[in-house]
Amino acid sequence: MPDRSRTRDLSEVPDPDLLARIAQGELGALGVLYDRYERDVRRVVARLASSSADIDDVVQNTFLEVLRAAAGYDGRPNARPWLIGLGVTQIRRDRRSVSRLAARLAAWAREPASPPTSPEESAVTSARAARLRRAFEALSTKKREVVVLVTLEGLSGEEVARVLDVPVATVWTRLHHARKELSHAMSQEES
């Protein structure tokens, strides 16, 4: 029977120490890390994965990758950006076709859950969501990643730079151009 007190003791262990324990083969530490960050990794994966069927696999593969990569962890106090980076890497490996990309974007840009108050509002909301989906699909993969990580996930430019292994200036440049392209595409379709 597993020792639950050992897992409870690990719940207070800082991320760098957990990763050091994982690097030494301590699977209980991986479980604690999973409990801390699975939701964050899953949220990013859900926004970037090819289909909803892929989400569980990508999240699982991300945490399995931790077993291999833990020894190379850079020691920052919060492992969230590092884990998200592993998730993004898994997604990049998982991408296979344009049709999967379209399905992912459709899932990402779902209409709001609260119903519009009138049929006219419903039509306007649906049309705007479709325009946004098309504009988002038109962005390059690199720009989409930056939009999701900065705008939707709230990661800092420095964190995104580490996740994507690019200079911080590249993150801001991609985000600037992505926003400009989205704005232009939305205004073109509205006129």
Image (tube, rainbow, N blue to C red):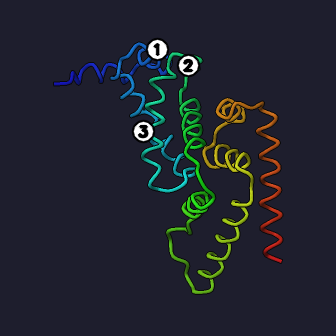
- Residue that appears at 66% across and 79% down: 124
Q: Amino acid at mark 3?
A: Gln
Q: Is residue 171 left or right of residue 66?
A: right
Place of residue 130 in the rendered image (x, y in percent of width and height, measured from the top left): 65, 71
Q: How many marks?
A: 3
Q: Which residue is mark 1?
A: 20
Q: Amino acid at mark 1?
A: Ala
Please, which residue is most extreme toward the left here? 1
Look at the image and tell me in which quarter the N terminus lies: top left
Out of 142 and 40, give the one closest to the viewer.
142
Question: Of the residues under marks 1 and 3, which one precedes in the sequence?
Answer: 1
- Residue that appears at 80% across and 62% down: 183
| Residue 178 higher or lower than 73, as above or below | below
Give the quarter of the image for residue 44.
top right
Give the quarter of the image for residue 26.
top left
Q: Residues within 10 Å of mark 3 (few under 14, many from 20)?
A: some
Q: Amino acid at mark 2?
A: Tyr
- Residue that appears at 70% across and 66% down: 134
Q: Secondary structure at mark 2?
A: loop
> Is mark 1 in CB contact (under 8 Å) with mark 3?
no
Q: Secondary structure at mark 3?
A: helix
**Label 1, label 3: how far apart the Cα atoms are:** 20 Å
Out of 116 and 26, give the one closest to the viewer.
26
Q: Which residue is mark 2?
A: 73
Question: Of the residues under marks 3 and 2, which one precedes in the sequence?
Answer: 3
> Is mark 3 in CB contact (under 8 Å) with mark 2?
no
Q: Which residue is mark 3?
A: 60
Give the quarter of the image for residue 99.
bottom right
Place of residue 49 in the rendered image (x, y in percent of width and height, measured from the top left): 54, 50
**Label 3, label 2: how far apart the Cα atoms are:** 19 Å
Place of residue 145 in the rendered image (x, y in percent of width and height, measured from the top left): 67, 46
Please, which residue is most extreme toward the front here? 96
